[in-house]
Amino acid sequence: MSVRPVTQISQAQPTLEGAGVKLHRAFGFHDPSLVDPFLLFDDFRNDRPEDFLRGFPWHPHRGIETITYVLSGSVEHGDSLGNTGALGAGDVQWMTAGSGIMHQEMPKGDTFGRMHGFQLWANLPSNLKMTDPRYQDVKSGEIPVVIDDDGTRVRVICGEFWGKTGPVDGVAASPRYLDVFVPAGVKKILPVDTYQKAFAYIFEGSGSFRDASEPFGVLLEKEAAGEEILIRDQTGNRSLVLFGTGEEVTVQAGDKGIRFLLVSGTPIEEPVAWHGPIVMNTQEELRQAMRDLNAGTFIRKSA
């Protein structure tokens, strides 16, 4: 089995979004081929309600899917189709915007005023860009949890892992979305589909992701010899790790353990025309979306 090498490590950057929500963006609005089929990833973590309560008022989406995963606090949502609801701690919403939807998301803190969640955008292939919108709202208790003998714990939100299948289904890129905790000092090898792009996002603890063919002592020797080492230091809070090709990901947990999202998906490999929350294949399709917005015809009814 081949272990995926780490190709890039970066830190999520402070960003202002919506009506003034302070969050950290791990990637987005740059090269869409970087983690194709995924376009954007935000970490909206804050313990100051004044930094997030203004939320994300009414805005459009077309041509993508948005995945919201809440760890603490809640997110109330509503849309132009009349759907309303709230996501609580541990809940997930997988929204397929398809041909177009207007919606809003308004975060609220927990009893201590804390809010923490993630939003991931996934692209849709050209044949599904104008599909009917749909929601998959998943409560925390519906998400299977797998616990290994060494204490490693994995919540399987989407895809199959260690014999469990996540409740989110029918998604174009056949993604796998895992919430992984590896206890202190434990080294773990996690399988990843060879043909999918993959990334990890660390949000608790620290650890090291590296090619097992390069033992840590060898890396130290190379560094001492003046060679540039891409990854020797441990990754920690709000670190994004991108992987090359292979069948497995290796992680060595630090002294407080490590918790991270491990996300993979099949690349779409199509042209991308992108303006904010609208992602199409051509500039003409993008212009048509803008015309639809201006004309009040953005929301389309199925026949």
Image (tube, rainbow, N blue to C red):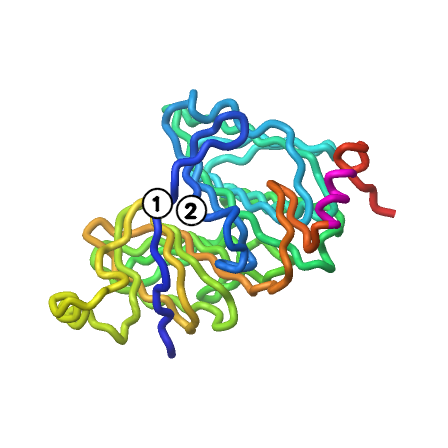
The residue at the far right in this view is: 303
Please state if 130 lies on the left or on the right of 146 as rendered.
right
The residue segment tinted magenta is 284-291
- Residue 52, horizontal then vertical, whole percent: 46, 26
Nearest to the observer: residue 144 or residue 128: 128
The residue at the far top in this view is: 50
Kindly identify which residue carries mark 2.
Answer: 26
User: Was residue 288 drawn as part of the magenta stretch in this picture?
Assistant: yes
Name above or below for residue 61 compared with residue 171.
above
Callout 1–callout 2 Cβ contact below 8 Å: yes
Q: Which quadrant does the N terminus fall into?
A: bottom left
| Mark 1 Cα shell of 10 Å, populated few (<14), some (14-19), many (≥20) | many
When asked about the image quadrant of residue 230, the answer is bottom left
Magenta stretch, main secondary structure, is helix
Question: Helix or strand or loop: what does disc 1 sit on?
Answer: loop
Nearest to the observer: residue 303 or residue 148: 303
| Circle number at residue 238 | 1
Nearest to the observer: residue 207 or residue 123: 123
- Residue drawn at (57%, 31%), measured in percent from left and top? 105
- Residue drawn at (39%, 70%), measured in percent from left and top? 248
| Circle number at residue 6 | none
| Mark 2 Cα shell of 10 Å, populated few (<14), some (14-19), many (≥20) | many
Q: Which callout, 1 or 2, points at the residue further toward the start of the chain?
A: 2
